[in-house]
């Protein structure tokens, strides 16, 4: 199990007119293949900024970021787009599905950029939807699904390229409690299958599914601890 992520003294400063926001002041973090990590911390502490850099949606102002043995800190937008497409599966709080496209089309979308032909795209998208239990919803549009089902479609889309890392920024933020635990069961399964998962959440019982919890505060890592007893199922949570 090698290192998959290594950030060294990453800084991110946003400049807005005359004002500067130091979103990340110096973050050094290492994550191994197959780890399941939760990022926690108050609003504005830099969680999404760090996720966006790890996910190659943004680049640091200073410091280095090695992803899968490649230095991505100074890559061009084109190079980043390619890395993003191959290595990263992103899941967002707001699902970010195309409303006019079917589930199958939504999930197949990343495969267009990867250069697959139509029938391969459809086969792979179907398998990804099946893996999240939605094989009977392939031709539905997002607005014909529940919130939990929409998030499953988004997870299928994140998985379809077989990425090295799954990044989920508040994946349960728009879901009710029961549905949140269903989604966490799915992440648990993905982790069992060997996927590397990084998730942002501000809810303790959601973070408790992760095997390691990193707390950010004011753009710095405040604590970075192994969770000795991660939640593995949702029975307890549901019966409470
Ligand atoms: P979190 O996800 O922990 O709530 P963020 O990473 O979104 O925190 O934000 C960290 C800080 O950076 C906040 O002060 C926020 O206002 C600022 N920030 C985030 N994104 C931008 C941006 N695109 N432009 C300017 N400031 C930003
Ligand atoms: Mg955020």
Image: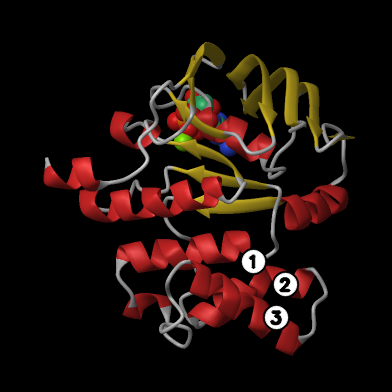
Q: CA distance from mark 3 to mark 1?
A: 9 Å
Number of disc labels = 3
Side of 239 relative to 115 (left or right)? left
| Other-residue count near label 1 (Cα within 10 Å), few / some / many at <14 / 14–19 / ≥20 | many
Along the polypeptide, which appears first: circle 3 or circle 2? 2
* Residue at disc 2, secondary structure: helix
Residue to which mark 2 is pinned = 111
Q: CA distance from mark 1 to mark 2?
A: 8 Å
* Residue at disc 1, secondary structure: loop
* Residue at disc 3, secondary structure: helix
Q: Residue 106 sits in which quadrant? A: bottom right
Residue to which mark 3 is pinned = 121
* Residue at (44% x, 22% y) in the render: 227
Measured as percent of width and height from the top left, residue 124 is found at 66, 76
Residues under numbered marks 1 and 2 in contact, where contact means CB atoms less than 8 Å apart = yes
203 in relation to 225, above or below? below
Along the polypeptide, which appears first: circle 3 or circle 1? 3
Residues under numbered marks 3 and 2 in contact, where contact means CB atoms less than 8 Å apart = yes
Residue to which mark 1 is pinned = 160
- Residue 69 is marked as none
Q: Residue 219 sits in which quadrant? A: top right
């Amino acid at each position: 199990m090698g290192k998959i992520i290594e950030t060294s003294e990453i800084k991110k400063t946003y400049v807005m007119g005359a004002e500067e926001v130091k979103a990340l002041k110096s973050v050094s973090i290492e994550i191994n293949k197959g780890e399941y990590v939760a990022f926690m911390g108050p609003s504005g502490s830099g969680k999404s900024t760090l996720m966006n850099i790890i996910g190659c949606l943004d680049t640091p102002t200073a410091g280095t970021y090695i992803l899968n043995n490649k230095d991505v800190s100074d890559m061009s937008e084109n190079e980043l787009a390619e890395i993003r497409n191959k290595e990263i599966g992103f899941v967002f709080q707001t699902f970010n599905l195309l409303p006019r496209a079917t589930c199958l089309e939504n999930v197949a979308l990343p495969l267009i950029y990867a250069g697959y032909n139509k029938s391969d795209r459809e086969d792979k998208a179907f398998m990804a939807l099946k893996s999240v239990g939605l094989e009977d919803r392939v031709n539905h549009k997002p607005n014909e699904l529940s919130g939990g089902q929409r998030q499953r479609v988004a997870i299928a889309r994140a998985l379809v390229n077989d990425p090295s890392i799954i990044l989920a920024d508040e994946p349960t933020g728009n879901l009710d409690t029961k549905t949140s635990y269903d989604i966490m069961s799915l992440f648990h399964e993905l982790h069992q299958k060997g996927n590397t998962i990084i998730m942002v959440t501000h809810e303790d019982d959601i973070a408790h599914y992760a095997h390691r919890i990193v707390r950010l505060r004011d753009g710095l890592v405040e604590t970075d601890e192994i969770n000795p007893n991660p939640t593995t199922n949702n029975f307890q949570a549901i019966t409470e």
